[in-house]
Structure formats: structure tokens, C-alpha cells
Amino acid sequence: MADLVPLNDVEKCYWSPQAFLRCFRAVKWDYAAGLRRAEETCVWRREYAVEDMKEDDVWTEGETGKELVFGYDVNARPVLYMHPWRQNTEVGPRQIAFVVWCLERTIDLAPATDPATEMLCLCIDFGANVKDAKGQPTTLGQARKVLEILQTYYCERLGKAICVNIPQIFFAFYKLVSPFVDPITKEKIRFLEKPDATSLIPPSQLQKIFGGDVNLEYDHATYFPALTKLCMERKQANLERWRKYGQGKCGLDEAIIRGARVPEGAAEPSTAAAGAAGEDASVEPPTEQLAAASLGGGSSTDSGHAASTAASDATVAVPPVVATTPGAEPDKFVDAPVAPAAAVEKAVPSVA
């Protein structure tokens, strides 16, 4: 017990009720298993130094735009794009670290909604129709390691995964990997014969390769610093809200942490719209003009990130929530399974 280190403020902010419930949902509400999953996640995040990862640590990995965060789907979930054919580095730990870094940045850009948006959307373009593809085959060991991280430490984060331009050889590889994929995760993966994801992501926030209107020419020197700056500002704003309302404990709702609302009885009003812009009564909104252009806040017809940043008065694109529009059909994967009341009461203890 002497080796145990108390949670710091960043960790307490991370462990919201939603974070605990994701662990318990992943193990089908087994109380002991859920606690183990939460503890394992906390230990892994420390040992992997997730919160200490810097832009410079993965700069080279991101140079080709093989992974990038861009836009939101119809359920207001941030979208992470992966282009394996743009691979520019050798298979190794740093590639895995880059996946983790991109997942963290995608989660940082979840909008301020109440209830909180917990999931993300994944779009993968395998580039089967690209003549000069740079990608090299992912090893089975590397794929298993990434799956282990995703399913163990980012459980219940995937809303939907869309795969396009898939080479035939991939399906043979998928057969080898699929035994390690959780059945619920498998249900969320869609292999599209025709690259058209417009039923899930609005065309104005969807890359052309997936059937959208956005012609995205990746400019690493513009995009990467803008993404990092925006995400770090939002993380700091979230932490300040936790320090203001969290009473120094775990368990503050993510809707409050992100600024969608304030706790009952709090004097200062807050709205989801203000929270989406990083605002609340005590936190200055992050400066997002440059990041908005780089992340798709400008016109969908922009030729690329560099051109987009010329618009100094760009505004952040509001995440669409089409599913709440009358007549719109919500994505069946956006809602988490309903747990028995007794299980929820037992699974979310008051943690100091």
C-alpha cells in the first residue's frame, strides 16, 4: 500500500460518473470487474504517461495526415479520420503512441452537451484505389496491441466505425484479428462498398473520400499546432471548472466539466452553447479562430488548411445534432445500454 499514490487534480477530473460507468458497462455491470477495470485504466494512463504526451513526441507521426480529427457526426460525436495508406514511419511503439494521442485529442473536442457526449466516430480510408500508397502492412502483434488499448482503456468510446476503399487482402487480415475484437465493437464497424458516409456525417463536415463536400489538403505545419492549442485550452478550461465545482473529488458530471451546465444551486448561469465554445462564468473562452479553420470551421469548399487560416474571423463549426430534429432517426449505437438501477447505484460510489 506504501506504493499507492493519491489521484492528482487531472485524474480526479477524468474520473467522472461517466468514466466509471463506461468501465462497468464494458464488463456487463460486474461490480468487482468494473472496479478492476477502473483501477487498471488509472494505472495504465500513469504508466503510459497519457497526460504528459506532447505535440513534439508525435510530430513526425502526424506529418502526412494519416490520422486527424475533423468535424462531427449527426450525433455530435467528434470524428477521427485514419488513412493507413499515408503511413510514413516504421512499425513500433511510437505509432501506437500516436493512436493514443489522437484518441485523446478527439475526446478533448467532444462538444458541451447535456447529457455529455462520450463517444467518437471513426472513419478509416484504406486507400485501395491510391496508386502511390505509402502504407506498409500492420503486423498482427501491432494490431492486437492497439485493440487491447482501445477495448481495455477506451472502452465504450466508439460510437461507429466506417471503413472505405478496402483492399481484398485486408479481409484476410481481419479474420486473424477478429477473434480479439469485442462482439459489441464488431456491431459498430461498417465496411462500405461505396464510400458514402453522409447518412452519419453531414457532407459539410465530411471529407470527399467518404462522400462529403470537404476537399481537405492536409497542411501539417498549420493543422497540428492549431489542434494542440485548441485541445490544451479546452483541457485547461475543463480542469478549472472541475476545481470550481468538483469539491476536490472524483465524480463531477462531464456535462459540468465541459461547461454545458453548472451544478444545481450554483449562482452563475451556463448554457450548452457557451460550453461548446469553452465558456462558463469563470473561464475565458479559448481563442479558436486558427483552430476553427484548421478543423473545418471554414467553408467546406476551402482547398486546404493553409487557405482556411487566411480567414481570421472564422468561427467554430457547431457540432450538428441532427438526431434531435423531428423525423430524424437517431443512430442506434449512440445510447449506452440501460443498466439496472441497483447496478448503477453500486457502481458509482462516492470517491474522494
Image (tube, rainbow, N blue to C red):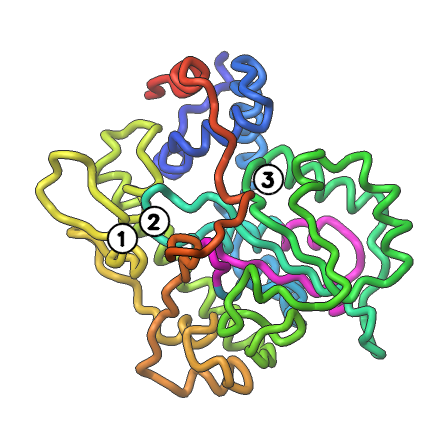
Badge 2 local density, few (<14 within 10 Å), some, or many (20+)?
A: many
| Dot 1 amino acid type | Ala
Q: Is residue 76 visible?
A: no
Above or below 145: residue 307: below
Q: Is residue 45 left or right of residue 232?
A: right
Which tag, 2 or 3, sits closer to the chain's start?
A: 3
Q: Nearer the viewer, mark 2 or mark 3?
A: 2
The residues colored magenta run: 72-99
Q: Which mark is residue 191?
A: none
| Dot 3 amino acid type | Tyr
Above or below 309: residue 135: above
Q: Which residue is mark 3?
A: 48
Above or below 330: residue 134: below
Q: Which residue is mark 2?
A: 113
Q: Is residue 167 left or right of residue 218?
A: right
Q: Residue at x 50, y 47 (%)?
A: 52
CA–CA distance between discs 1 and 3?
33 Å
Under tag 3, what secondary structure?
A: loop
Q: Are marks 2 and 1 in contact (CB under 8 Å)?
A: yes
Which tag, 1 or 3, sits closer to the chain's start?
A: 3
Q: Which mark is residue 272?
A: 1
Q: Is residue 211 visible?
A: yes
Q: Residue at x 61, y 59 (%)?
A: 58
Callout count: 3
